[in-house]
Amino acid sequence: MTGKELREKYINFFVSKEHKQISGKSLIPENDPTVLFTTAGMHPLVPYLLGEEHPAGKRVVNFQKCIRTGDIDSVGDATHLTFFEMLGNWSLGDYFKEEALSWSHEFLTSKEWLGINVDKLSVTVFEGEEETGVPPDTEAKEIWKSLGIPEDRIYMLPREDNWWGPAGETGPCGPDSEMFFDVGKEACSAACKPGCSCGKYIEIWNDVFMQYNKKKDGSYEKMSRKCVDTGMGLERTVAILTGKKSVYDTEFFIPIIKKIEQASGYSCGMDPDKDISVRIIADHVKTSVFILGDENGIKPSNVGQGYILRRILRRAIRHGRKLGITGQFLSSPASAVIEMYKDVYPQLLEKKDFVLKEIEVEEERFISTLAKGEAEFEKMVPNILKGKEKIIPGRLAFKLYDTYGFPIEITQELAAEHSLTVDREGFDEALKKHQELSKQGADKIFKGGLADSGEVTTKYHTATHLLHEALRKVLGEHVKQKGSNITAERLRFDFAHQEPMTPEEIKKVEDIVNQQIGSDHPVTMEVMTLGAAKEQGAIAFFETKYEEKVKVYVIGDFSKEVCGGPHVDRTGVIGKFKITKEQSSSAGVRRIRAEIE
């Protein structure tokens, strides 16, 4: 089964169960300050899982592009990827465990759908917790037994394996039930079970049951409105259905890997370490293409998503060096990614020139950086050779890494050429300290969860609508939103406009927004078709992202715009609006940063 066939089967199955297909969203979350990327299919649906009504109804299904960097050190093994696609279906206060588990079982095992041998499936359910008073999920266990899964293949596991949420310190959460495929490997031990890292069991589906609300005191109460969030990894499932040992042996990677083999002259299967490097390059190139080619795509930089993109690209380049590639080479595998996905994600083809140009620029920049690092290394060598121990101190090795992006492996290679060694322990200690400081900084920036920062970001979201309309009134109706990003500290808004704004224009826009806030306009919402919204004069600039029915938010008599929300009830609660910066974002696109007090 191909990826195209699996996407279609999954959508068709759940449409037959009265789900409405909705489109996947951007990899760059516009209004969630808690994460840098969309990490799961449920991520864009969190507001609806928290209680907001979805314009498509209570049963929805889609496929969503996702990025996770938490397991980046595992990339290159049989199953871990940085970029992946998630098939998902949701019940937003409608059906619950009986239907969700039964349909999961039907889709996986029925010959009409995937036809997986039921003897190959094992499942996990939540074992319960005495300290929180949450009982074992015996309901899910009994449903699995009724579906024919024998008790010895139903595993009761703890919170770290079978619990989701809440998104913040408080809010909806609950147990989940995961489905695993037994690849037939011999068990690594008597304790081997789903979740074991030996590779015998591969997770292919997860049903999350949001049935509890976690309160501020840490206790859990049952919710009257229960939701289901399910997800199936596209690449892993195709690998299983086609009998492949690794996701890298599937259609999702073979064309990319061929380009890497051509660039390096290395053929996979000859050296396990080099095989891993090829896989890492393939994964990281694909991830980079999807970040750059996203509808809210960003460039490599030293902050936020741009920093992650830069690190991923540079890691791919470093692994290229392990294969003997010293020049630029990523454009060819990047082009293969675009060719592979152009029909499913046409924006990749539309932004092809931009994507390839940015990759080439970053490659050129990093190769130059490596050359500077090598020159700095050569300056260190004479003094170290004068010493007795002939060891490059860990602090100097870390300086090369931190200042010049110089990989420790290259430092070790160059050291060996001079009959020197590297204090790897000292380097690791310096790196660990650096990572801890970085994590503390990230935790400070992205503290809390969606539920915790929702009130502030909701104010920013409504302020963005006011800003959009104010810009159109001051600069002209050619102004169109090109992207936005909201954190708990500020909003960022990109819009079509050729010239830098004058100080007078910035002041005028700022004054208009504050006038509308001071007027304390009501903010109302109505669900209608996109056509009806346009007839009523609503602004809608991202038509490829909209569903059949959309939400139209009206702010007094000032603004009418198609949007997914959330919004405040009245503008008066927003606070004072202040533009802090106006600058160029790209050709023909300006960027405003603003804060509310």
Image (cartoon, grey):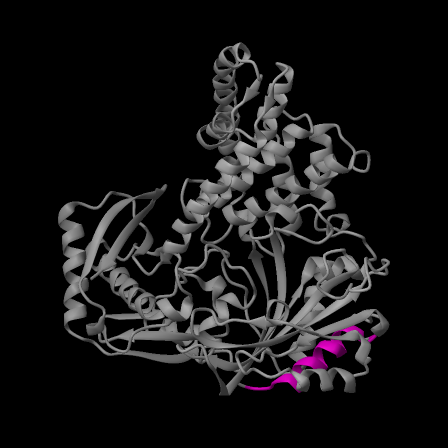
Disc count in the image?
A: 0
Residue shown at 58% from the left, 16% from the top: 390
Residue that extends furthest to the bottom in the rendered view of this protein = 224
Residue shown at 25% from the left, 60% from the top: 467
Residue 104 lies in the magenta stretch? yes
Q: Position of residue 177 (x, y in %)?
A: 66, 75
The N terminus: image quadrant = bottom right
Say above or below: 372 vs 178. above
Which quadrant of the view contains residue 419? top right
Residue 582 lies in the magenta stretch? no
Say above or below: 211 vs 563. below
Which quadrant of the view contains residue 584? top left
Magenta residues, dominant SS class: helix
Query: Can the viewer see residue 161 in this picture?
Result: yes
Residue shown at 60% from the left, 19% from the top: 415
Residue shown at 46% from the left, 55% from the top: 28
Q: Nearer the viewer, residue 125 or 567?
A: 125
Say above or below: 87 vs 129. above
Which quadrant of the view contains residue 269? top right
Q: Position of residue 135 (x, y in %)?
A: 60, 84
Say above or below: 573 vs 494. below
Q: Position of residue 541 (x, y in %)?
A: 39, 61
Q: Nearer the viewer, residue 386 or 62?
A: 386
Q: Nearer the viewer, residue 335 or 109?
A: 109
Q: Which residues are magenta?
A: 94-111
Q: Is residue 252 left or right of residue 37?
A: right
Query: Can the viewer see residue 562 in this picture?
Result: no
The C terminus: image quadrant = bottom left
Q: Position of residue 336 (x, y in %)?
A: 66, 42
